[in-house]
């Protein structure tokens, strides 16, 4: 398909167990997958998904410390870190910044516990993206809104809400000049 990045995960440890008991097996299996990525000039973009081995920053770092490969990078998801009681900025970012391939733009709040548009949660998205930019990040931002709680909006309007929030974050933190789309443009999407 011509892609360079394959977003992937670590493995699910048994529920209610110490994930570090399975660290050796996670590393063994991941090395096999990353070897396939290396052989095909691809990037295994490890996402910090909830309930997998690499759901918290210390275990993400453990993987990077134990697998040396230019084909292993991070798909950094601030919202998922928040859902796993970790602080995306500066804590997670400082620990993992050398390994980031791209960012999932997904913010979250803990009260109420849900994903929210960029800049409306606890990720400090503006500071996070500014630090990444200042550190030389030149990758992509992947918008991953998860905004089903906005029940009065259709999917296109939810996506537009997320895109507008990212634009506002980039405008205020990096001085970008993105225009904001009107939700009304997408009012009838998917209702025909």
Image: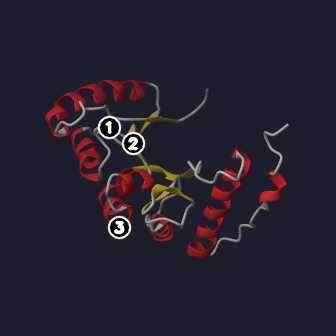
Q: Quadrant of the C terminus?
A: top right
Give the residue at mark 3: 90
* Location of residue 44 with respect to 40 vertically, above or below: below
- Residue shown at 18% from the left, 36% from the top: 17
Q: Quadrant of the N terminus?
A: top right
Label at residue 49: 2
Q: Are marks 1 and 2 in contact (CB under 8 Å)?
A: yes
Disc with the residue nearer the chain's start (1 vs 3): 1
Whether residue 189 sits left or right of residue 159 in the image: it is right
* Location of residue 158 with respect to 134 vertically, above or below: above
- Residue shown at 56% from the left, 74% from the top: 173
Give the residue at mark 1: 52
Question: Furthest-left residue in view?
Answer: 21
**What kind of element bears circle 2?**
loop
Residue 44, given in percent of the width and then of the height, sits at 42, 35
Q: Nearer the viewer, residue 125 or 83?
A: 83
Q: Report the mark closest to the observer, 3 or 2.
A: 2
- Residue shown at 31% from the left, 57% from the top: 85
């Amino acid at each position: 398909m011509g892609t360079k990045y394959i977003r992937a995960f670590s493995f699910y440890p048994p529920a209610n167990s110490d994930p570090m008991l399975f660290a050796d097996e996670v590393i063994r299996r991941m090395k096999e997958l990353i070897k396939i990525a290396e052989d095909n000039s691809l990037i295994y973009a490890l996402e910090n998904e909830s309930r997998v081995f690499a759901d918290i920053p210390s275990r993400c770092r453990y993987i990077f410390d134990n697998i040396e490969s230019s084909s292993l990078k991070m798909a950094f998801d601030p919202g998922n870190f928040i859902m796993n009681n970790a602080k995306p900025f500066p804590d997670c970012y400082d620990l993992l910044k050398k390994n980031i391939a791209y960012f999932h733009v997904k913010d979250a709040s803990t009260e109420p516990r849900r994903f929210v548009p960029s800049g409306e949660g606890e990720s400090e998205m503006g500071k996070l993206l500014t630090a990444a930019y200042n550190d030389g990040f030149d990758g992509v931002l992947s918008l991953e809104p998860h905004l089903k709680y906005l029940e009065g909006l259709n999917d296109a309007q939810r996506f537009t809400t997320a895109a507008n929030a990212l634009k506002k974050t980039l405008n205020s933190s990096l001085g970008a000049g993105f225009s904001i789309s009107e939700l009304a443009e997408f009012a009838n999407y998917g209702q025909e």
